[in-house]
Image: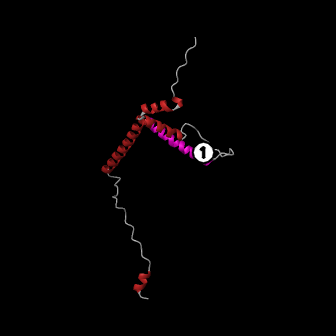
Amino acid sequence: MSDDELVSALPETPEPVQPSQEPTVDAGSPKVYRRRKRDAELDQRDGDNFWRRSLADPVGRRELYRFIASCGTFATPFACGPNGFPQPEATWFKAGEKATGQRLFDSLAKIDRVNFYKMLDEHDPRFARREPKAKES
């Protein structure tokens, strides 16, 4: 067997992996730092405006409250199996859901307090306005 035949019998080598074509970010450059900081602030402002618009809409307030309540934010759940034995994995899962709902609840309170409390007045029984009792004579 000749050398050419041996080389042709070898499996093909894959193409070398090309490095990413994205430019490298110079984290030490003040110009790049300012641009990335500005972009992050714009993203945050856009997100806040989204939540602000959602809270300003009656349907948005209702659906946000439903989501927050469905996460178990207003309860402390402990999961049990059918025989009453504790299920720690399910309890931790529910704790994660509750933490998600609480994080959204807290962030909405910071973004738009007026409409946030309007949402609670409209949907949360803890904040329901009660008519004063008539005075008995």
Which of 106 and 116 lies nearest the eye of the viewer? 116
Which x, y percent locates residue 33? Answer: 34, 49
Which x, y percent locates residue 131? Answer: 52, 21
Classify the position of the C terminus by image quarter. Answer: top right
Give the farthest residue toward the front: 59
Classify the position of the N terminus by image quarter. Answer: bottom left
Which x, y percent locates residue 132? Answer: 53, 20
- Number of labels in the image equals 1
> Which quadrant would residue 79 be assigned to in this image?
top right
| Callout 1: SS | helix
Residue bearing the label numbered 1: 91
Q: Main secondary structure of the magenta part?
A: helix
Residue shown at the point (53%, 44%) measured from the top left? 97
Give the farthest residue toward the top: 137
Which of 132 and 103 lies nearest the eye of the viewer? 132
Residue 99 located within the stretch drawn in magenta: yes
Horizontal relation, residue 55 to residue 76: left or right: left
Count residues near mark 1 (Cα–Cα under 10 Å), then give few for <14, some for 14-19, many for 20+.
Answer: some
> Which quadrant would residue 95 be assigned to in this image?
top right
Q: Amino acid at mark 1?
A: Thr
Which x, y percent locates residue 120? Answer: 48, 32
> How are the residues colored?
secondary structure
Residue shown at the point (41%, 38%) measured from the top left? 54
Residue shown at the point (31%, 49%) measured from the top left? 30
Horizontal relation, residue 114 to residue 90: left or right: left
Give the farthest residue toward the bottom: 1
Give the farthest residue toward the left: 31
* Residue numbers of the magenta segment: 88-109
Query: Does 123 sit above or below residue 87?
Result: above
